[in-house]
Image (cartoon, rainbow, N blue to C red):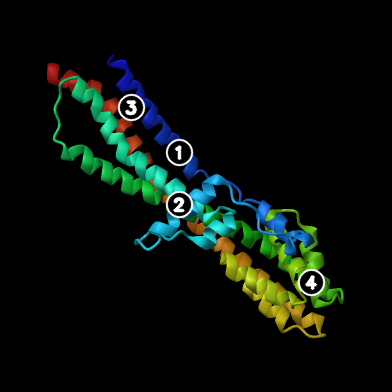
Amino acid sequence: MNLIPALLTGGTVGGGVALLVRELLRPQPALAAALARSAPASLSMPEPELDREERWGRWLLARIERMPGVRPPTKNLALLGQGPGQFMLKKTALAALGLLCPVLVTIPWIIAGVSLPFYVPAVVGFAIAGLLFVTPDLAVRDQAKRAREEFAHALSAYMDLVALKRAADAGPTEALEKAAAVGRGWPFLYLQGALRRARLEKIPPYQALTELADTYDLPGLDDVADIMRGSATDGAAVYKALRARTAALNAELLSDQATEANAASQKMTAPGALLAVLVMLLMAFPAVIRMLTV
């Protein structure tokens, strides 16, 4: 009889831990959005039907979006290929799980005859619910940061390719499109989709790149659009500008990597010092015991 509450408690806690670990993982950005944008027929096709979770999440978001701290990070979610409805539904599910966990954990205590004040599970539940409610925001922010770093590395190679195409007397539009067609990763698919949309909608390619940078908050792409906007018949000047911007971007990336490496090294200093102290205590423990017992 007492086994059922324990199983329920363990299953609930295990499910919460599994959801938390799944949320903290850093998956690659979804390519479905980029592939859909790269298809020429996507201009005339209707909007795809939303799945059930996305519809429920948007229904919930429409009713609580005015609350502080509820508005989802739309640019980060768009970059990762996630819908705001699923994001909000996940936040709500984690918060509800945080509210229920303390209540279920106290069931074995109540069965064992240990009485707890009623406000203890409530306070702990609200604290856990608040923590789990903001966890998806932190996870999405970290994933988007990693995705933008990956895009910056791809953009460095893309600017080199565009500079080489311009040095070979290719036109601005031709240089941008041929350089984007070389890559197969998700950053190049985003670039290919934007440039293909520019050709179909008869707009300048640098305008499509600027819109892509604004949609996903990609500041490095604005520089490419600005350089190509001012490009004229002189390919050598564009070549020098692109190579200079590539060198500056590479220096920024190397500086960021060095900063992250230093931060990781500093985080390992305290565990290393604690381990050294524990080893010293273990080595000195027999001698201290012998001195005290003599």
Classify residue 106 by image quadrant: top left
Q: Secondary structure at mark 3?
A: helix
Amino acid found under the numbered disc labelled 4: Arg
In the picture of the structure, the residue carrying the numbered disc 3 is: 9
Q: Earlier in the sequence, mark 2 or mark 4?
A: 2
- Give percent across and percent down for residue 216: 58, 64
Residue at 63% in and 50% down: 30
Inter-mark Cα distance, 3 to 1:
15 Å
Is 206 drawn above or below residue 73 in the view shown? Answer: below
Is 122 drawn above or below residue 244 in the view shown? Answer: above
In the picture of the structure, the residue carrying the numbered disc 1 is: 19
Amino acid found under the numbered disc labelled 1: Leu
Of tags 1 and 2, the one toward the viewer is 2
The image's mark for residue 199 is 4
Amino acid found under the numbered disc labelled 2: Met
Q: Earlier in the sequence, mark 1 or mark 4?
A: 1
Residue at 72% in and 68% down: 159
Inter-mark Cα distance, 2 to 4:
36 Å
